[in-house]
Image (tube, rainbow, N blue to C red):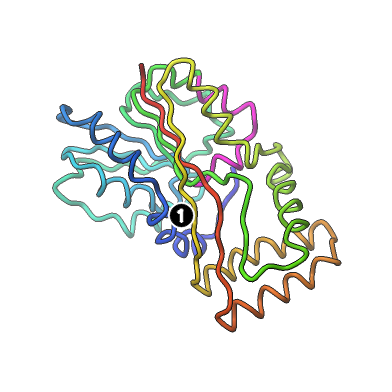
Amino acid sequence: MHKFENSWLFQREKVDNLSKNISIIKKINSFFKSYNEIRIIDLGTGTGSNFRYLSKKIKYKNQSWTLMDLSKSSLNEAKKNIVINNKIKKINLKHDDIIKNIHQHTFKDYDLVTGSAFLDIMPLDWFNKFYKLNTNTKLVYFSINYDGYFKFFPKHNLDKDVLKLFNNDQKSKKNNKNKAVGPDCSDIINNCFSKTHKCYLFKSNWTDVKNKKFQLMFLDFCEKIIKKNRKTNLLDWIEFRKDNIINNKSKLSVNNKDFLAIKI
């Protein structure tokens, strides 16, 4: 599985939390209202941002969490930022690769399987494998799934070319192993779970983000893609974007979706 820099994960946490769709949280709380204990696993937990968000948003006490990631450094950061309160009964950190070792896992011990901002980097065959292991899981919730569109303001005549290149790269091989599904991730997981679950897709867009550091870090991803594909004609776009960000004339919007499946 792809590793993200901890600095990027921390930088985007506030933006993600403001973007996650509250309608899904209401459905999760409604489902669990009669439960005495809730068992949750957070896949690709990174530095633990999804855990920090969701453990607060779930109203009920006696939550038992497992936080899983392939990055030991990210898990160490997650551990540093864990705050035990009267809602959290138990937290277990698990170092593992949920792509490579998917068949070694069982999810029958969890009431809620969740993750944030990584479905777009998963290979296509992973979704069917994951679904088969979760046909009886009560709730499956994935937030901030990239949906194929972003824009900076002000406009530039190369915006469409950069977006096309970015989306093509999203579907490229990750770590020279498997092709990712990219922006199709929400539709793919929705189609899988609709066989056995009631499924919901809600918008969770990053809207008009003005934070300089955040924009520059996102732009850095774009620049790396442009240089990797040797699209030197798009480097003027990078300089234009940097200039506008540095001079407080820029804002960024990115389309995402949140997914929830409730066992029928």
At which x and y percent is residue 7?
50, 65
Query: Image quadrant of residue 155?
Result: bottom right
Query: Could you tell me residue 117's position as x and y percent?
Result: 50, 47
Pick the residue in front: 243 or 52: 243
Foreground pick, 28 / 138? 28
Nearer to me, 29 or 36: 29
Q: Secondary structure at mark 1?
A: helix
The percent coordinates of residue 232 (x first, y second) are 85, 66
Q: Is residue 238 left or right of residue 233?
A: left
- Neighbor class of circle 1 (other Cα within 10 Å; few <14, some 14-19, many 20+) is many
Residue drawn 72% across the image and 65% down it: 223
Residue drawn at point x = 46 percent, y = 51 percent: 46
Q: Amino acid at mark 1?
A: Ser
- How far from the left and from the top, in percent, is residue 181? 65, 37
Which residue is depicted at the point 57% across and 27% down?
A: 127
Relative horizontal placement of residue 91, taking residue 245 as reference (left or right): left
Which part of the image, by quadrant, shows the C terminus?
Answer: top left
Q: Main secondary structure of the magenta part?
A: helix
Residue highlighted by disc 1: 74
Q: Is residue 196 above or below residue 142?
A: above
Q: Quadrant of the N terminus?
A: top right
Q: Is residue 128 magenta?
A: yes
Residue drawn at x 32%, y 52% as measured from the top left: 52
Provide the residue span drawn in magenta: 117-131
Question: Please, is residue 155 above or below residue 102 in the view?
Answer: below
Instruction: Please say if 141 is above or below 57.
Output: above
